[in-house]
Amino acid sequence: MTTALKVSRDLVRHLSTFDLSETAVMAPDLGTARASMTPYRVAAGFMAKSTKLLTAPDENLKLTHSESDRVAAFGLSLAPADLSGDWNVCRYAGKCRDACLATSGNGRYGRTQAGRVWKTKWLASEPLHFLRVLVDEIDRIKVGAWSDAGWTVSFRFNVLSDLPWETIAPWLVRRIADRGIRLYDYSKWPTAKRAGASSLGYEVCQSVTRGRPLPSTFMGRPVVDGDLSDARFLDPIGSVVLLRYKNVSTTDRAMAQASGFVRSVA
Ligand code: SF4
């Protein structure tokens, strides 16, 4: 007997088959939308109750780095690449999958990964409900209070994914930007395919190689130390962001370097 290999499906292509306009997303009752996440949580081993979707500024090591710039960074953490088993959220991921940050920090805990998996499956299966809840949580971020305290609020759609939200739900990108929330992401997509993001107030940086120590310039461009802050929208135009290699359980430094995803810049 042969066992068929399970192949993950491209989530962007799948989402394009839904009407994800603002009218459609805001139509469902919020309580109904929230309740619909429960079966996905239970299937992943969590309690049968709804919970928040967003990663708060103090819940992800990478996002806390922005505190040095007085940036309160919120984000959405899905299961990277095809880690959910069903859906590929990183169409252009290559060798980076092995060295991805998915298992560093809190990600090394199975429960954290399971939390990302149910969110990914819920988004794929019930995108209207998922987005209804996401909008509600983002709307409730107290941008004015953060601003009064001298902080900028930022949001990353893709803490551990690579979905082109300016294509999936452009109105949502605009809605968030219009609240004064700075939107940014790293992406492996070809630059031309995400060219529309910036006009909506969504800064998309090309993913760059990692290494240490950091030189003052790389490929002729001034270097920004990406480990000091995650607030990419504050970087000088034309600069290159470098980050140091992080230990993850899925690979080691030698493998990551051999893959080309990590390079020595010394
Ligand atoms: S594209 Fe980004 S999030 Fe996806 S696997 Fe690669 S490094 Fe991880």
Image: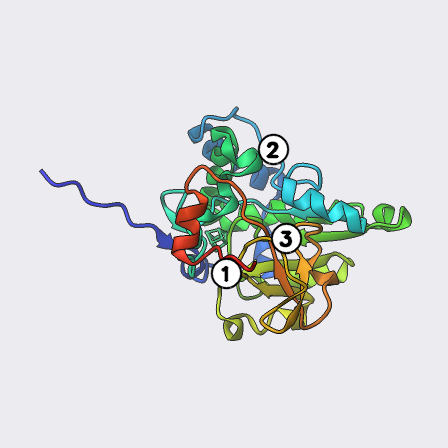
Q: Residues within 10 Å of mark 3 (few under 14, many from 20)?
A: many
On the image, numbered disc 2 is attached to which residue? 51
Q: Which residue in the protein does label 3 denote?
A: 156
* Other residues around mark 1 within 10 Å, as few (<14) / some (14–19) / many (≥20): some
Report whether the residue tagged 1 is closer than 8 Å to ligand 1: no
Between label 2 and label 3, give the one nearer the viewer: 3
User: Dot 1 lies on which element?
Assistant: loop
The residue at label 3 has a CB less than 8 Å from ligand 1: no
User: Badges 2 and 3: C-beta atoms under 8 Å apart?
Assistant: no
User: Which numbered tag is attached to residue 19?
Assistant: 1
> What residue occupies the far right of the structure in this picture?
148
CA separation in Å, label 2 and label 1 = 25 Å
- Cα–Cα span, label 2 and label 3: 19 Å
Q: Count numbered badges in the picture.
A: 3
Q: Are marks 3 and 1 in contact (CB under 8 Å)?
A: no
Residue type at numbered disc 3: Arg
Q: Quadrant of the C terminus?
A: bottom right
Q: Position of residue 17 (x, y in %)?
A: 42, 61
Percent position of residue 196, x then y: 59, 73
Type of residue at label 1? Asp
> Closer to the camera, 133 or 106?
106
Category of crowding for the residue at label 2, using alpha-carbon neighbours closer than 10 angstroms: few (below 14), some (14–19), many (at least 20): few
Instruction: Name the residue rendered at 68%, 64% in the picture.
Output: 216
Q: Is residue 231 among what the camera can see?
A: yes
Going from N to C along the chain, the mark reached first, 3 or 1, is 1
Q: Which residue is outermost to the top?
A: 47
Q: Nearer the viewer, residue 170 or 264?
A: 264
Dot 3 falls on a residue whose secondary structure is: strand
Say which quadrant the N terminus sits in.
top left
Q: Is residue 199 left or right of residue 92?
A: right
For residue 137, say whether it is visible: no
